Amino acid sequence: MVELAERFLLGGLIVSVFAVVADVLRPKGFAGLFGAAPSVALATITLTQLTEGKQYAALEARSMIAGALAFLVYAIACVYFMAKKHRRAMPTTLAMLPVWGACALGLWSLFLK
Amino acid sequence: MRIHLNLAPLKQTHWHEYVTRFLLGGIITVATGLIAKHFGPVVGGLFLAFPAIFPSGATLIDKHERDKKRRAGISRTIRGRLAAALDARGAAMGSIALAAFGFLIWQCLPHHNAVVILTTAVSAWLVLAVLLWRVRKLHICT
């Protein structure tokens, strides 16, 4: 329970810090880089390497590469629907999450399973 | 365009939007840990690159741009969506750097000091992301 609370606090804190940095940086395209900041990864790997060991954390980081490539496809899909089809941000970014999931699982089953 | 700070969005952002981001970040980090515990680190690791803050950030950008236009008397505009699309384009470049962050940790963490590797990996993420953004600005790739 304590470990979950630590994860919650550290994750919330790091995500918030990166989000505030993204808010105040200009131009907007540059600030967008922080939308893919390693916030959850930093919090998780910091705590995981302490509790489960470095090998376990390294294995998570290897899978993270597939997750990041899925994020790339997800972000490109969001650009397409918002810039070309003029769809609103909230429904688009949420509706495209299954694209991330499908790509991540696809890469997992092809290379990591 | 030069990279600079604009503190005005901090005033536009309501306190509940900060709370939402904190809760989202916390919940996703906890969920990632639970997934790794249940399904193992290989599946759990995928979620380290889950688009956690991107949807809320893009939604806020869209909303703030629409509010700005509404205050200027323009009720129908696509400016918010285009601004959010710009943000997504930045996130696409950031995600390539995110893969490099994962690669560095995968290769170096087992053999070196964790604090040094995590600090180096975050720095490498930032440097590569900025480099990609600058290359994009030079229109070398579109």
Image (cartoon, rainbow, N blue to C red):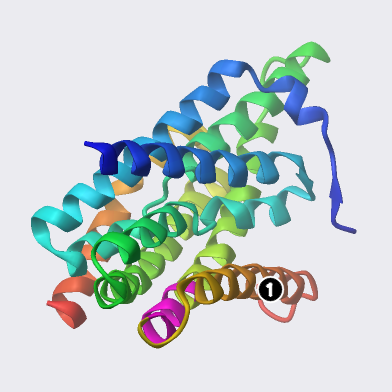
Left or right: residue A69 versus residue B57 is left
Residue at the image position 37 percent from the left and 80 percent from the top:
B106
The quarter of the picture where the C terminus of chain A appears is bottom left
Residue B14: where, in percent of width, then height?
Answer: 63, 17
Residue B9: where, in percent of width, then height?
Answer: 75, 29
Q: Which residue is mark 1?
A: B127
Above or below, A57 against A36 in this view is below
Q: Chain of mark 1?
A: B
Residue at the image position 57 percent from the left and 26 percent from the top:
B18
- Picture quadrant of residue A109: bottom left
Residue at the image position 37 percent from the left and 73 percent from the top:
A65
Residue A13: where, in percent of width, then height?
Answer: 52, 39
Q: Is residue A109 visible?
A: yes
Main SS of the magenta part reads helix
- Tell me the magenta residue range: B101-109
Q: Foreground residue, A3 or A90? A: A3
Q: Foreground residue, A77 or B112? A: B112
Above or below, B63 against B114 in this view is above
Residue A3: where, in percent of width, then height?
Answer: 27, 44
Residue type of the residue flagged with mark 1? Val
The quarter of the picture where the N terminus of chain A appears is top left
Left or right: residue B110 versus residue B73 is left
Left or right: residue B8 versus residue B120 is right
Q: Is residue B102 part of the magenta span, yes or no?
A: yes
Helix, strand or loop at mark 1: helix
Above or below, B129 against B64 in this view is below
Q: Residues within 10 Å of mark 1 (few under 14, many from 20)?
A: few
